[in-house]
Amino acid sequence: MTGPVSSRPPAVKEWRLNVYLSEHDPDTTARIVLDTGDNVLESHAGARRSPSDRAMPEIGDELAAGRALIAMGRMLLRAADGDMKATGAADTDGPAPLWLSRE
């Protein structure tokens, strides 16, 4: 049994995400730029190595980039919440958290 055939092809969008990492020991900074074609969003975050830790640049890269990606996710959720409110959608309590807190 088959469902209804749609005459419209599925919509496909491509968003470009660039991650820029900069290390100035003991600090690592990440800059994330998201180009949706309609908007460009940018987030920043950093990581700092403790002086007592061994230098492992990949850890700083991962921490800084991960934090900047989380910040970007929050920006996108806030933008979606604002767009929903602008269209008259039912009241929302703001963007949902990116993860549940530990109890």
Image (cartoon, rainbow, N blue to C red):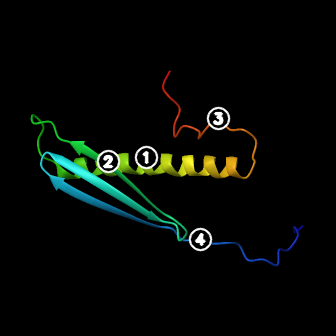
* 78 or 59, nearer to the observer: 78
Residue type, label 1:
Ile
Q: CA distance from mark 2 to mark 3?
A: 26 Å
Q: In the rendered structure, which disc, 1 or 2, sits on the residue that comes first in sequence? A: 2
Left/right of residue 11 with respect to residue 74 in the rendered view: right
Left or right: where 92 falls relative to 31: right
Q: Is disc 4 placed on a helix, strand or loop?
A: loop
* Front label number (4 vs 2): 2
Which residue is found at the position 29% from the left and 61% from the top?
Answer: 20
Q: Secondary structure at mark 2?
A: strand
Q: Which residue is mark 3?
A: 93
* Closer to viewer: mark 3 or mark 1: 3
As drawn, the label of residue 45 is: 2
Find the distance from the CA under tag 4 to the CA under tag 1.
22 Å
- Mark 4 and mark 3 lie on one chain; the one further toward the N terminus is 4
Q: Are marks 1 and 2 in contact (CB under 8 Å)?
A: yes
Q: Identity of the amino acid at label 4?
A: Lys
**Which is more N-terminal, label 2 or label 4?**
4
Is 69 positioned to the left or the right of 56 in the image?
A: right
Q: Which residue in the structure is indicated by mark 1? A: 70
Q: Position of residue 92 (x, y in %)?
A: 68, 38
Q: Residue at x 41, y 51 (%)?
A: 69
Contact between labelled residues 3 and 4, with CB atoms less than 8 Å apart: no
Which of the pair 9/87 is nearer the observer? 87
The amino acid marked with disc number 2 is Ala
- The picture quadrant where one finds residue 91 is top right
Q: CA distance from mark 3 to mark 1?
A: 20 Å
Q: Please identify the quadrant where the N terminus is shown.
A: bottom right
Please tell me how crowded label 4 is: few (under 14), some (14-19), or many (20+) other residues with Cα within 10 Å.
Answer: few
